[in-house]
Image (cartoon, helix red, strand yellow):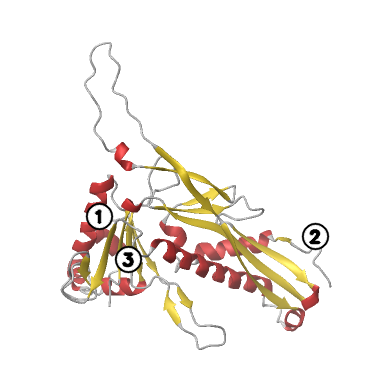
Amino acid sequence: MSQPTAGDVHVNRPLTNISIATIQSATNFVASQVFPIVPVEKQSDAYYSYDNAFWNTDEMEVRAPAAESAGSGYEVDATQTYFAKVWAIHKDIPDQVRANADPQINLDSDATKYVTLKALIRREKQFATTFLGSSIWSYERTGVSSSPGTGEVLQWNDAASTPIEDVWNAKEAILERTGFEPNKLVLGYSVYKALVNHPDFVDRVKYGQTTGVAMIDTSELAQLFKVEQVLVMRAISNTAKESAAASHSFIGGKKALLCYAAPAPSLMMPSAGYIFSWTGYLGAGPDGNRIKRMRIDLRSCDRIEIEMAFDMKKISADLGAFWNNIVA
């Protein structure tokens, strides 16, 4: 059986660069835009977390002459760990296909973009699983079609709902609990669609339009919610089994997440979440991704393979607010 030689299997830097460029331009995917990406040299390690209660107590005292100042400190939890699993997928380019391809077709580049899209879908779905679910965040509300009770709000596609008040209530709760005001709002596409057509937003925006037509986008939503960024999860995934009829759906579902995300990774500053990317993996890019090109003589083809190594972690439950089924 023919096996790839050492010279046939390697991390292909030009193709990896194409993959990185594809990732950076894939605006439908929000996983890397919400929480800071922490580049790590090791596949697994411990990270520190802090109880914000230590930071927010008033312990300063009047200092008498020649007396020591009041002392304080905080506890550090070093029991939390990450493990960057290595995800991988490949696309084969048969020799017969390469020989028959027109000169303007770059099969290696196309295969690289194809497997990169697969990697982005996997990472986006992992983001949704890790951060967009029940019993993850301290503040959680469920959307209902009528008569909301405790822990419920009227679904935002209802003209009588109060999405601006709902988000501001969550902002206030997080700020009061932690001292940090949320700065990012993540919306499933169906939620985004409901908000930009909600009368509360249309009425607030339309009078500022010279044409008289209200044009609401993420920047206007960010201004009304007073957050730095509103991110819309536009990415889709086909959940049907192979050879079955396609069944596409939005990865973000009918959900919303309000959170505080640190501007950059820091040992001392809180963040609702982090994404640990294993950049120490030989040849890996900033997202823990690398592209390998190898020869498979047994199949008479070239193989383009992507690996992406990462782990997503909720860091502070108090810094997030989640709405489930927030539109019908």
Looking at the picture, tell me which residue is in the foreground, 128 or 24: 128
User: Where does residue 255 sit, x and y in percent of width and height?
Assistant: 33, 69
Residue at the disc numbered 2: 6
Looking at the picture, tell me which residue is in the foreground, 164 or 308: 308
> On the picture, is 30 further left or further right than 97?
left
Marks 1 and 2, the one that precedes in the sequence: 2
User: Where does residue 262 sit, x and y in percent of width and height?
Assistant: 39, 48
Whether residue 322 is situated above or below residue 104 in the rendered picture = above
User: Where does residue 188 sit, x and y in percent of width and height?
Assistant: 36, 70
Mark pair 1, 3: CA separation: 13 Å
Mark pair 1, 2: CA separation: 55 Å
Whether residue 107 is situated above or below residue 22 in the rendered picture = below
Q: Amino acid at mark 2?
A: Ala
- Residue depicted at x 39% and y 70%: 252
Q: Amino acid at mark 3?
A: Ala
Can residue 250 be spotted in the picture?
yes
Image disc number at residue 256:
3
Crowding at mark 2 (Cα within 10 Å: few <14, some 14-19, many 20+): few
Crowding at mark 1 (Cα within 10 Å: few <14, some 14-19, many 20+): many
> On the picture, is 316 further left or further right than 181?
right
Callout 2: SS: loop
Looking at the picture, tell me which residue is in the foreground, 195 or 179: 179
Residue at the disc numbered 1: 171
> On the picture, is 158 further left or further right than 191?
left
Residue 138 occupies quadrant = bottom left
Q: Amino acid at mark 1?
A: Lys
State the quadrant of the N terminus.
bottom right
User: Where does residue 141 sit, x and y in percent of width and height?
Assistant: 26, 64
State the quadrant of the C terminus.
bottom left
Marks 2 and 3, the one that precedes in the sequence: 2
Callout 1: SS: helix
Looking at the picture, tell me which residue is in the foreground, 130 or 212: 130
